[in-house]
Amino acid sequence: MQLQLFRTLWGHGDDIHRSAAEAAAAGFSGLEGGLPGAPIARRDLAQALEDSGLDIIGEICTGGEGDEWWIPRREATVKDHLATLEQGLQNWDESGLSPRFINCMAGLDAWTLGQSVEFFGAAMALGAQFGRTLSFETHRSRAFYAPWTTTAVVRQLPEIRITADFSHWCVVAERLIDTEEEALEVVIPKVHHIQARVGYPQGPQVPHPAAPEYRECLEAHQRWWERIWQSQVLRGYQVSTMTPEFGPNGYLQTLPFTGRPVADLWSLNLWMGQTERAHFEAAMGAPATPFANTSRSLASSLHP
């Protein structure tokens, strides 16, 4: 099995051509992000992918609207979430782009188990109808916000695919989730994609994963990711996809009063990609995609 790295478009800035070129130069296989709403932005994305030779993993968020479209509305029903999913799938079809698969931030944390099962069952059917592979993300505010809710749904829908962003579970549980062995045993065999952000018991993103004070957190996530890789090998995967996903918008810590970020996001994600490439090769005895040497050192990703 081979590991392929994807660059998140979350917080990448306004220049999609530069972002794609940087990702390609660093040895990433593609980008991951939502479909832009404006036609000109969609054309720019398509051109950037063509020019850089990169693939894309698409994203759809259900149940939101307006300026905070990624946050599900509390009053949104199962029907509402399915309608936004269907519209998102239609938009990807009309875009002319061919995402590798589509990652979904889906559902609502306040739903009952019955509502979640109803939604995900219908969502999987929609994916099949559109000929798209859907992978559903473990994320706060969503139906898969916690190990236990996710486990309950997976047991009823064993064909479901999961995007593992276990950083969220660390916050919800307020502990590293090695304690949740039952959930890990149920969910890991369903993981299709990894979003590689390191969380800790008080937040979804450590200031820097290389910092020695967060070594325990990094090593815990690496244990979980390694188990996912092993499971994917047993399931016959030829390629495992991973998106280093350190991001902005309250995730990246800032200094009081000045609002100055404590690190540079692209450097954080580059470091995460380099580290997991080496981790994968050591753990699995198999090559990851080539990762280009970068002139940006670890030190350059930290502000003095």
Image (spheres, rainbow, N blue to C red):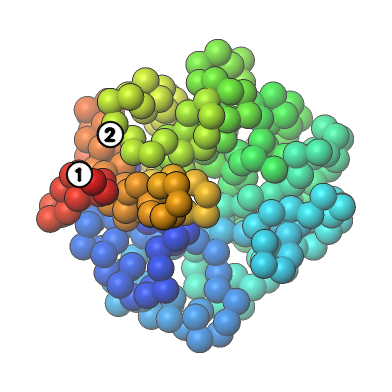
Quadrant of the rendered structure where residue 279 is? top left
The amino acid type found where label 1 is placed reads Leu
Q: Where is residue 209 in the image (x, y as percent from the top left)?
A: 33, 35
Quadrant of the rendered structure where residue 171 is? top right
Instruction: Pick the residue in front: 174 or 237.
Output: 174
106 left or right of 221?
right
Marks 1 and 2 close (CB-CB < 8 Å): yes
Image point 76% across, 57% down: which residue?
63
Residue identified by numbered label 2? 210
Up the image or down, 257 lies above or below 280; here it is: below
Up the image or down, 97 lies above or below 259; here it is: below
The amino acid type found where label 2 is placed reads Ala
Instruction: Pick the residue in front: 185 or 14.
Output: 14
Residue identified by numbered label 1? 298
291 left or right of 177?
left
Q: How crowded is mark 2: few (under 14 residues within 10 Å), some or many (20 or more)?
A: some
